[in-house]
Image (cartoon, grey):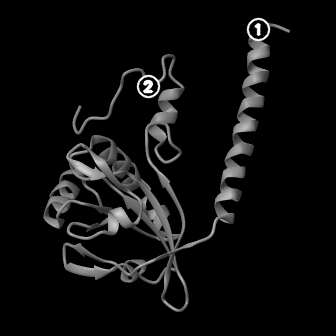
Amino acid sequence: MKTEEIVETQLATAMADLEKAKQRVVELRRQLPTESVADYELTGPAGCKKLSALFGDKPDLILIHNMGAGCPYCTMWADEFNGVLHHLESRAAFVVVSPDAPEVQQRLAGKRGWRFRMYSAKDTTFIEDMGFGSEEEHYDSHAMPGVSALHKKPDGSIVRVARDFFGPGDLYCGVWHLFDLLRDGPGEWEPQFQY
C-alpha cells in the first residue's frame, strides 16, 4: 500500500472513531441528572424579564453565556449563531446573556446586525450561579463563554439539562473546523472585531 492510501485509511478510521466518541459524549451527557435553575430576572431592551418568560411558547431554551462586548471570540461565536438563528429557533427558544448593560448589548447588536434576543445579567448572580463566572478577568469580563440547554417543565419549573464551555476548536464554531482543513490550520489567527 502506498503512503497516501495508508494515511487515507487511517484518516477514515480516525473520523469514524471521532463520530463514535461524539455520540458517546451525547449519550453520557443525557444520563447526567438535571439541575434546578431559579427563575432569575434578567434585563433586556424593554426592561426586566423572568427567565421563564424567555422560553416563549417553547419548552426548551438555548442560552448562550457571552463574555460581553470586549471579547472578539464571543463576538465571532455570536456572529455565527446569528446566521443560523432561524434554524435554531425552529426547535428551541434562543437568547444570549452577557454581563454588559442592555444599552451596550444593543449597540453591539446594531453594529453587527444581530437579530437574536439579548439579556443582561448585570447586577445579578446568574453568571456565577450557572457556573460561568471567572475569578480572572479576560477581555474586561469575569465571565466565561458557553451554553446552557434549559427545559421548562409543565409545572413551570426550569432545569438545566446540559452545559458546555466555548473555546477555540470546540464543536460550536465552524470557523475553527474549516481552518483545520487548511495546510497550516488556523496558525496564529485570532478573531478580530474588524479585518
Q: Which residue is mark 2?
A: 186
Q: Which residue is mark 1?
A: 3
Does residue 39 appear to the left or right of 44 in the view shown? right
Between 144 and 136, which is closer to the camera in this rendering?
136
Instruction: Give the image location of residue 109, x and y in percent.
Output: 22, 57
Q: Amino acid at mark 1?
A: Thr
Residue extending furthest front?
A: 135
Mark 2 and mark 1: span between their CA atoms? 25 Å
**Quadrant housing the C terminus:** top left
Between 164 and 113, which is closer to the camera in this rendering?
164
Does residue 185 appear to the left or right of 68 in the view shown? right
> Disc number at residue 48?
none
Above-or-below relation of 56 to 165: below
**Quadrant housing the N terminus:** top right
Q: Residues within 10 Å of mark 2 (few under 14, many from 20)?
A: some
Tell me whether circle 2 and circle 1 mark residues in contact (CB < 8 Å).
no
